[in-house]
Amino acid sequence: MVSRPKVLAIVLAGGEGKRLMPLTADRAKPAVPFGGTYRLIDFVLSNLVNGGLRQIAVLTQYKSHSLDKHISVTWRMSTLLGNYVTPVPAQQRLGPRWYQGSADAIFQSLNLINDERPDHIVVFGADNIYRMDVSQMVDAHIDGGLSATIAGIRVPRSQATEFGVIDAGADHKIKEFLEKPADPPGLPDDPEASYASMGNYIFSTDALIDALQSDADDADSRHDMGGNIIPSFVSQGEAQVYDFTQNQVPGSTGREQAYWRDVGTIDAFHEAHMDLVSVDPVFNLYNDEWPIWTYPVQMPGAKFTLRGLALDSIVSSGCIISGGAIERSVLSPNVRVHEGARVDNSVLFSNAVIGRNAVIHKAILDKGVVVEEGAQIGVDPEADRARGFSVSEGGITTVGKGTRVRR
Protein backbone atom coordinates (compact mmCIF):
# COMPACT_ATOMS: atom_id res chain seq x y z
CA MET A 1 0.00 0.00 0.00
CA VAL A 2 1.29 3.44 -0.95
CA SER A 3 1.72 5.60 2.13
CA ARG A 4 0.15 9.04 1.86
CA PRO A 5 0.52 11.93 4.28
CA LYS A 6 -2.10 11.92 7.02
CA VAL A 7 -4.57 14.81 6.79
CA LEU A 8 -7.10 16.00 9.37
CA ALA A 9 -9.91 18.29 8.21
CA ILE A 10 -11.35 20.92 10.53
CA VAL A 11 -14.54 22.71 9.48
CA LEU A 12 -15.29 26.02 11.20
CA ALA A 13 -19.04 26.06 11.80
CA GLY A 14 -19.47 28.27 14.85
CA GLY A 15 -20.52 31.57 13.31
CA GLU A 16 -23.76 33.32 14.27
CA GLY A 17 -24.74 34.32 10.73
CA LYS A 18 -26.33 37.61 11.80
CA ARG A 19 -26.63 38.87 8.21
CA LEU A 20 -28.88 35.91 7.35
CA MET A 21 -31.48 36.78 9.97
CA PRO A 22 -34.26 35.70 10.39
CA LEU A 23 -33.08 32.39 8.87
CA THR A 24 -30.50 32.11 11.67
CA ALA A 25 -32.84 33.13 14.49
CA ASP A 26 -33.25 29.49 15.51
CA ARG A 27 -30.31 27.69 13.87
CA ALA A 28 -26.59 27.99 13.15
CA LYS A 29 -25.72 29.45 9.77
CA PRO A 30 -24.22 26.18 8.41
CA ALA A 31 -27.53 24.45 9.25
CA VAL A 32 -29.61 26.77 7.04
CA PRO A 33 -31.40 24.75 4.33
CA PHE A 34 -30.25 25.24 0.75
CA GLY A 35 -31.27 23.95 -2.66
CA GLY A 36 -34.37 22.13 -1.51
CA THR A 37 -32.96 19.18 0.43
CA TYR A 38 -29.50 20.26 1.60
CA ARG A 39 -27.99 22.24 4.46
CA LEU A 40 -25.18 24.71 3.77
CA ILE A 41 -22.65 22.50 5.55
CA ASP A 42 -23.34 19.61 3.16
CA PHE A 43 -21.33 21.35 0.43
CA VAL A 44 -18.01 21.57 2.26
CA LEU A 45 -18.43 18.09 3.76
CA SER A 46 -19.22 16.63 0.32
CA ASN A 47 -16.11 18.28 -1.15
CA LEU A 48 -13.93 16.85 1.60
CA VAL A 49 -15.40 13.35 1.49
CA ASN A 50 -15.46 13.16 -2.32
CA GLY A 51 -11.80 14.25 -2.28
CA GLY A 52 -10.84 11.38 0.01
CA LEU A 53 -10.55 13.38 3.28
CA ARG A 54 -12.63 11.39 5.73
CA GLN A 55 -11.41 12.35 9.17
CA ILE A 56 -13.36 15.54 9.78
CA ALA A 57 -14.07 17.56 12.93
CA VAL A 58 -16.78 20.23 12.73
CA LEU A 59 -16.32 22.96 15.35
CA THR A 60 -19.73 24.27 16.41
CA GLN A 61 -20.90 26.91 18.87
CA TYR A 62 -24.03 29.04 18.39
CA LYS A 63 -27.53 27.47 18.26
CA SER A 64 -25.94 24.22 17.19
CA HIS A 65 -28.65 21.65 17.99
CA SER A 66 -30.06 21.24 14.46
CA LEU A 67 -26.53 21.33 13.01
CA ASP A 68 -25.26 18.70 15.45
CA LYS A 69 -28.29 16.52 14.76
CA HIS A 70 -27.90 16.85 10.99
CA ILE A 71 -24.24 15.85 11.13
CA SER A 72 -24.88 12.94 13.49
CA VAL A 73 -27.77 11.55 11.42
CA THR A 74 -26.50 12.28 7.91
CA TRP A 75 -22.73 12.01 8.01
CA ARG A 76 -22.29 8.48 9.36
CA MET A 77 -19.42 6.77 7.55
CA SER A 78 -17.84 3.38 8.00
CA THR A 79 -15.43 3.37 10.94
CA LEU A 80 -13.50 0.36 9.65
CA LEU A 81 -10.74 2.57 8.22
CA GLY A 82 -11.03 5.26 10.87
CA ASN A 83 -13.44 7.48 8.95
CA TYR A 84 -15.62 9.96 10.81
CA VAL A 85 -17.39 13.30 10.69
CA THR A 86 -17.93 14.54 14.23
CA PRO A 87 -19.41 17.76 15.63
CA VAL A 88 -17.23 19.29 18.34
CA PRO A 89 -18.86 21.93 20.56
CA ALA A 90 -16.87 24.51 22.50
CA GLN A 91 -15.22 22.27 25.10
CA GLN A 92 -13.91 25.04 27.38
CA ARG A 93 -10.71 23.05 27.94
CA LEU A 94 -8.83 26.29 28.66
CA GLY A 95 -11.37 27.79 31.00
CA PRO A 96 -15.04 28.80 31.09
CA ARG A 97 -15.17 30.80 27.85
CA TRP A 98 -16.61 30.52 24.37
CA TYR A 99 -14.46 30.59 21.25
CA GLN A 100 -12.97 34.08 20.92
CA GLY A 101 -12.44 33.73 17.16
CA SER A 102 -11.78 31.13 14.48
CA ALA A 103 -8.12 30.72 15.51
CA ASP A 104 -9.10 30.39 19.16
CA ALA A 105 -11.64 27.72 18.19
CA ILE A 106 -8.83 25.56 16.80
CA PHE A 107 -6.50 26.42 19.68
CA GLN A 108 -9.12 25.30 22.19
CA SER A 109 -9.48 22.08 20.18
CA LEU A 110 -5.79 21.14 19.94
CA ASN A 111 -6.66 17.80 21.55
CA LEU A 112 -8.17 16.79 18.19
CA ILE A 113 -4.84 17.41 16.49
CA ASN A 114 -2.81 15.78 19.25
CA ASP A 115 -5.01 12.67 19.13
CA GLU A 116 -4.77 12.23 15.33
CA ARG A 117 -1.19 13.48 14.86
CA PRO A 118 -1.72 14.45 11.20
CA ASP A 119 0.99 15.69 8.86
CA HIS A 120 -1.26 18.42 7.46
CA ILE A 121 -4.43 20.16 8.58
CA VAL A 122 -7.19 21.38 6.28
CA VAL A 123 -9.20 24.28 7.72
CA PHE A 124 -12.31 25.16 5.72
CA GLY A 125 -15.39 27.29 6.32
CA ALA A 126 -18.85 25.76 6.50
CA ASP A 127 -21.18 28.04 4.60
CA ASN A 128 -20.17 28.58 0.97
CA ILE A 129 -21.65 27.02 -2.17
CA TYR A 130 -19.09 25.42 -4.50
CA ARG A 131 -17.51 22.20 -5.71
CA MET A 132 -13.82 21.55 -5.10
CA ASP A 133 -11.55 18.51 -5.16
CA VAL A 134 -9.71 19.30 -1.94
CA SER A 135 -7.14 16.57 -2.58
CA GLN A 136 -5.75 18.66 -5.46
CA MET A 137 -5.19 21.57 -3.08
CA VAL A 138 -3.52 19.22 -0.58
CA ASP A 139 -1.14 18.04 -3.32
CA ALA A 140 -0.36 21.64 -4.28
CA HIS A 141 0.34 22.47 -0.63
CA ILE A 142 2.76 19.59 -0.29
CA ASP A 143 4.46 20.31 -3.63
CA GLY A 144 4.88 24.00 -2.73
CA GLY A 145 6.87 23.16 0.38
CA LEU A 146 5.60 26.09 2.45
CA SER A 147 3.78 25.98 5.78
CA ALA A 148 0.47 27.50 4.69
CA THR A 149 -1.65 27.44 1.53
CA ILE A 150 -4.65 29.73 0.99
CA ALA A 151 -7.28 29.07 -1.66
CA GLY A 152 -7.80 32.13 -3.85
CA ILE A 153 -10.54 32.80 -6.37
CA ARG A 154 -10.01 35.25 -9.23
CA VAL A 155 -12.38 38.23 -9.08
CA PRO A 156 -12.41 41.52 -11.01
CA ARG A 157 -10.29 44.17 -9.23
CA SER A 158 -13.38 46.38 -9.05
CA GLN A 159 -15.07 43.77 -6.84
CA ALA A 160 -12.04 42.73 -4.79
CA THR A 161 -12.46 45.64 -2.36
CA GLU A 162 -15.08 43.53 -0.54
CA PHE A 163 -12.72 40.63 0.20
CA GLY A 164 -9.51 39.70 1.87
CA VAL A 165 -7.09 39.98 -1.06
CA ILE A 166 -3.98 37.91 -1.72
CA ASP A 167 -1.02 39.62 -3.40
CA ALA A 168 1.08 36.80 -4.84
CA GLY A 169 3.88 36.51 -7.37
CA ALA A 170 4.09 34.29 -10.42
CA ASP A 171 5.55 31.56 -8.19
CA HIS A 172 2.33 31.68 -6.07
CA LYS A 173 4.24 32.81 -2.99
CA ILE A 174 2.20 35.40 -1.10
CA LYS A 175 3.79 38.81 -0.66
CA GLU A 176 0.97 40.46 1.26
CA PHE A 177 -2.50 39.71 2.61
CA LEU A 178 -4.80 42.74 2.44
CA GLU A 179 -8.19 43.14 4.16
CA LYS A 180 -10.68 44.89 1.83
CA PRO A 181 -8.06 47.11 0.14
CA ALA A 182 -9.12 50.30 -1.67
CA ASP A 183 -6.70 49.53 -4.52
CA PRO A 184 -6.44 45.73 -4.87
CA PRO A 185 -3.29 44.39 -6.54
CA GLY A 186 -3.66 42.72 -9.93
CA LEU A 187 -2.44 39.25 -10.87
CA PRO A 188 0.84 38.65 -12.70
CA ASP A 189 -1.05 37.14 -15.65
CA ASP A 190 -4.16 39.36 -15.41
CA PRO A 191 -3.72 42.93 -14.11
CA GLU A 192 -7.51 43.50 -14.01
CA ALA A 193 -8.18 40.59 -11.64
CA SER A 194 -7.22 39.88 -8.02
CA TYR A 195 -7.10 36.82 -5.78
CA ALA A 196 -9.86 36.93 -3.15
CA SER A 197 -9.40 34.62 -0.19
CA MET A 198 -12.00 31.85 -0.03
CA GLY A 199 -11.36 31.27 3.67
CA ASN A 200 -10.03 27.76 2.93
CA TYR A 201 -6.57 26.90 4.24
CA ILE A 202 -4.10 24.03 4.51
CA PHE A 203 -1.26 24.01 7.04
CA SER A 204 1.67 21.85 7.97
CA THR A 205 0.74 20.68 11.44
CA ASP A 206 3.73 21.79 13.52
CA ALA A 207 3.74 25.24 11.94
CA LEU A 208 0.04 25.73 12.64
CA ILE A 209 0.38 24.68 16.28
CA ASP A 210 3.24 27.15 16.76
CA ALA A 211 1.22 29.94 15.13
CA LEU A 212 -1.83 29.21 17.27
CA GLN A 213 0.23 29.23 20.45
CA SER A 214 1.83 32.57 19.57
CA ASP A 215 -1.57 34.00 18.71
CA ALA A 216 -3.05 32.81 22.01
CA ASP A 217 -0.25 34.60 23.87
CA ASP A 218 -0.96 37.88 22.05
CA ALA A 219 -3.44 39.90 24.13
CA ASP A 220 -4.03 42.31 21.24
CA SER A 221 -4.98 39.62 18.71
CA ARG A 222 -8.53 39.10 17.44
CA HIS A 223 -7.66 35.39 17.25
CA ASP A 224 -8.93 35.20 13.69
CA MET A 225 -7.58 32.83 11.03
CA GLY A 226 -7.77 35.33 8.18
CA GLY A 227 -6.97 38.40 10.24
CA ASN A 228 -4.12 37.09 12.40
CA ILE A 229 -2.87 33.59 11.57
CA ILE A 230 -2.55 33.98 7.80
CA PRO A 231 -0.70 37.35 8.01
CA SER A 232 1.78 35.75 10.42
CA PHE A 233 2.63 33.08 7.85
CA VAL A 234 2.84 35.70 5.09
CA SER A 235 5.27 37.81 7.13
CA GLN A 236 7.53 34.77 7.52
CA GLY A 237 7.47 34.06 3.77
CA GLU A 238 5.72 30.76 4.47
CA ALA A 239 2.41 31.19 2.62
CA GLN A 240 1.35 30.42 -0.94
CA VAL A 241 -1.88 30.82 -2.89
CA TYR A 242 -3.80 27.96 -4.52
CA ASP A 243 -5.54 29.16 -7.68
CA PHE A 244 -9.09 27.80 -7.45
CA THR A 245 -9.53 28.08 -11.22
CA GLN A 246 -6.99 25.26 -11.59
CA ASN A 247 -9.20 22.83 -9.63
CA GLN A 248 -10.76 20.21 -11.89
CA VAL A 249 -13.93 18.57 -10.57
CA PRO A 250 -15.22 15.46 -12.39
CA GLY A 251 -18.48 16.05 -14.22
CA SER A 252 -18.37 19.84 -14.00
CA THR A 253 -19.10 21.95 -17.05
CA GLY A 254 -17.07 24.89 -18.27
CA ARG A 255 -19.80 27.22 -17.05
CA GLU A 256 -19.35 25.93 -13.53
CA GLN A 257 -15.56 26.31 -13.52
CA ALA A 258 -14.49 28.07 -10.32
CA TYR A 259 -18.09 28.68 -9.18
CA TRP A 260 -18.05 29.87 -5.56
CA ARG A 261 -20.68 31.83 -3.68
CA ASP A 262 -20.45 33.35 -0.24
CA VAL A 263 -24.09 33.20 0.90
CA GLY A 264 -23.58 35.35 3.96
CA THR A 265 -26.41 37.79 3.17
CA ILE A 266 -30.06 37.30 2.25
CA ASP A 267 -29.48 38.75 -1.23
CA ALA A 268 -26.51 36.44 -1.88
CA PHE A 269 -28.46 33.46 -0.50
CA HIS A 270 -31.38 34.20 -2.82
CA GLU A 271 -29.12 34.81 -5.83
CA ALA A 272 -27.35 31.48 -5.28
CA HIS A 273 -30.73 29.72 -5.39
CA MET A 274 -31.58 31.45 -8.66
CA ASP A 275 -28.28 30.08 -10.03
CA LEU A 276 -29.75 26.58 -9.64
CA VAL A 277 -32.97 26.79 -11.61
CA SER A 278 -32.22 27.78 -15.19
CA VAL A 279 -32.21 25.27 -18.05
CA ASP A 280 -28.41 25.51 -18.14
CA PRO A 281 -27.74 26.18 -14.44
CA VAL A 282 -24.75 28.20 -13.31
CA PHE A 283 -24.35 25.61 -10.53
CA ASN A 284 -25.54 22.11 -11.40
CA LEU A 285 -26.84 20.04 -8.49
CA TYR A 286 -27.25 17.07 -10.81
CA ASN A 287 -23.58 16.18 -11.26
CA ASP A 288 -23.53 12.52 -10.23
CA GLU A 289 -19.74 12.32 -10.66
CA TRP A 290 -19.29 14.72 -7.73
CA PRO A 291 -22.53 14.48 -5.73
CA ILE A 292 -23.53 16.76 -2.91
CA TRP A 293 -24.53 14.36 -0.16
CA THR A 294 -27.30 14.79 2.39
CA TYR A 295 -29.91 12.79 4.28
CA PRO A 296 -32.49 11.31 1.88
CA VAL A 297 -35.98 12.61 2.62
CA GLN A 298 -38.41 9.74 3.24
CA MET A 299 -41.39 11.12 1.31
CA PRO A 300 -43.17 10.29 -1.93
CA GLY A 301 -42.37 12.17 -5.11
CA ALA A 302 -43.74 15.62 -5.80
CA LYS A 303 -47.33 15.65 -7.08
CA PHE A 304 -49.01 18.09 -9.48
CA THR A 305 -52.82 18.15 -9.58
CA LEU A 306 -55.56 20.40 -11.00
CA ARG A 307 -53.13 21.58 -13.68
CA GLY A 308 -50.57 22.69 -11.14
CA LEU A 309 -47.29 23.46 -12.87
CA ALA A 310 -43.67 24.41 -12.26
CA LEU A 311 -41.33 26.13 -14.73
CA ASP A 312 -37.55 26.40 -14.29
CA SER A 313 -37.84 25.26 -10.68
CA ILE A 314 -36.70 22.63 -8.20
CA VAL A 315 -39.59 20.87 -6.45
CA SER A 316 -38.58 18.44 -3.70
CA SER A 317 -40.19 15.21 -2.54
CA GLY A 318 -43.48 15.40 -0.69
CA CYS A 319 -44.58 18.66 -2.34
CA ILE A 320 -48.12 18.95 -3.69
CA ILE A 321 -48.82 21.66 -6.27
CA SER A 322 -52.61 21.65 -6.39
CA GLY A 323 -53.58 24.06 -9.13
CA GLY A 324 -50.86 26.56 -8.25
CA ALA A 325 -48.10 27.90 -10.53
CA ILE A 326 -44.38 27.86 -9.65
CA GLU A 327 -41.71 29.68 -11.67
CA ARG A 328 -37.98 30.11 -11.04
CA SER A 329 -38.29 28.89 -7.47
CA VAL A 330 -36.88 26.24 -5.12
CA LEU A 331 -39.26 24.25 -2.93
CA SER A 332 -38.03 22.13 -0.02
CA PRO A 333 -39.85 18.92 0.97
CA ASN A 334 -43.54 18.83 1.92
CA VAL A 335 -44.57 22.25 0.62
CA ARG A 336 -48.23 22.79 -0.33
CA VAL A 337 -49.29 25.26 -3.02
CA HIS A 338 -53.05 25.56 -3.47
CA GLU A 339 -55.25 26.46 -6.41
CA GLY A 340 -54.70 29.84 -8.00
CA ALA A 341 -51.57 30.59 -5.98
CA ARG A 342 -48.50 31.99 -7.76
CA VAL A 343 -44.90 31.58 -6.58
CA ASP A 344 -42.02 33.08 -8.54
CA ASN A 345 -38.34 33.82 -7.90
CA SER A 346 -38.71 32.49 -4.38
CA VAL A 347 -37.34 29.94 -1.93
CA LEU A 348 -39.75 27.94 0.22
CA PHE A 349 -38.47 25.83 3.11
CA SER A 350 -40.07 22.60 4.32
CA ASN A 351 -43.73 22.47 5.35
CA ALA A 352 -44.61 25.90 3.97
CA VAL A 353 -48.25 26.23 2.91
CA ILE A 354 -49.39 28.69 0.25
CA GLY A 355 -53.15 29.28 0.31
CA ARG A 356 -55.55 29.71 -2.61
CA ASN A 357 -54.85 32.76 -4.81
CA ALA A 358 -51.89 33.86 -2.67
CA VAL A 359 -48.90 35.50 -4.39
CA ILE A 360 -45.26 34.95 -3.39
CA HIS A 361 -42.69 37.04 -5.29
CA LYS A 362 -38.94 37.39 -4.62
CA ALA A 363 -39.29 35.95 -1.13
CA ILE A 364 -37.78 33.39 1.23
CA LEU A 365 -40.20 31.55 3.52
CA ASP A 366 -38.72 29.61 6.43
CA LYS A 367 -40.06 26.26 7.66
CA GLY A 368 -43.72 26.01 8.50
CA VAL A 369 -44.75 29.42 7.18
CA VAL A 370 -48.47 29.52 6.32
CA VAL A 371 -49.66 32.11 3.81
CA GLU A 372 -53.41 32.42 4.02
CA GLU A 373 -55.81 32.65 1.08
CA GLY A 374 -55.29 35.76 -1.03
CA ALA A 375 -52.31 37.05 0.98
CA GLN A 376 -49.26 38.50 -0.75
CA ILE A 377 -45.55 38.40 0.10
CA GLY A 378 -42.87 40.30 -1.83
CA VAL A 379 -45.28 42.20 -4.09
CA ASP A 380 -45.06 45.39 -1.99
CA PRO A 381 -41.80 45.52 0.02
CA GLU A 382 -42.93 48.55 2.02
CA ALA A 383 -46.09 46.77 3.08
CA ASP A 384 -43.96 43.78 4.07
CA ARG A 385 -41.76 46.01 6.23
CA ALA A 386 -44.83 47.51 7.86
CA ARG A 387 -45.95 44.02 8.84
CA GLY A 388 -42.60 43.36 10.50
CA PHE A 389 -41.05 41.17 7.81
CA SER A 390 -37.39 41.52 6.87
CA VAL A 391 -36.71 43.09 3.45
CA SER A 392 -33.14 43.09 2.13
CA GLU A 393 -31.36 45.82 0.19
CA GLY A 394 -32.09 43.84 -2.96
CA GLY A 395 -35.80 43.70 -2.19
CA ILE A 396 -36.02 40.09 -0.97
CA THR A 397 -38.69 39.59 1.70
CA THR A 398 -37.87 36.93 4.31
CA VAL A 399 -40.50 35.45 6.61
CA GLY A 400 -39.34 33.70 9.77
CA LYS A 401 -40.05 30.14 10.85
CA GLY A 402 -43.64 29.23 11.68
CA THR A 403 -45.16 32.62 10.80
CA ARG A 404 -48.79 32.85 9.67
CA VAL A 405 -49.25 35.51 6.98
CA ARG A 406 -52.76 36.94 6.83
CA ARG A 407 -54.37 38.82 4.00
Image (spheres, helix red, strand yellow):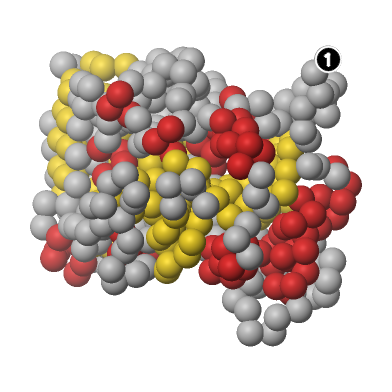
- Camera-side residue of 175 and 362: 175
Q: Is residue 328 above or below residue 100?
A: above
Decide: few, some or many residues near mark 1? Use Cα within 10 Å; few <14, some 14-19, many ≥20: few
Please indicate, yes or no, whether residue 283 appears anywhere in the rendered image: yes
Q: Is residue 298 above or below residue 378?
A: above
Mark 1: which secondary structure?
loop
Residue at 62% over, 33% down: 139
Q: Is residue 165 left or right of residue 135?
A: left
- Camera-side residue of 246 and 386: 246
Whole-percent x, y for residue 406 in the image: 23, 54
Whole-percent x, y for residue 357 in the image: 13, 37
- Camera-side residue of 82 and 247: 247
Q: Which residue is mark 1?
A: 1
* Residue type at numbered disc 1: Met
Rendering quarter of residue 232: bottom right
Q: Is residue 328 left or right of residue 299?
A: left
Please indicate, yes or no, whether residue 33 appears anywhere in the rendered image: no
The single residue placed furthest to the bottom in the displayed view is 220
Residue at 48% over, 15% down: 289
Query: Number of marks in the image?
Result: 1
Q: Is residue 379 left or right of residue 89?
A: left
Residue at 58% over, 49% down: 149
Rendering quarter of residue 305: top left
Whole-percent x, y for residue 350 in the image: 42, 37
Q: Is residue 225 above or below residue 182?
A: above
- Camera-side residue of 124 and 405: 124
Residue at 32% over, 17% down: 303
The single residue placed furthest to the right in the displayed view is 115
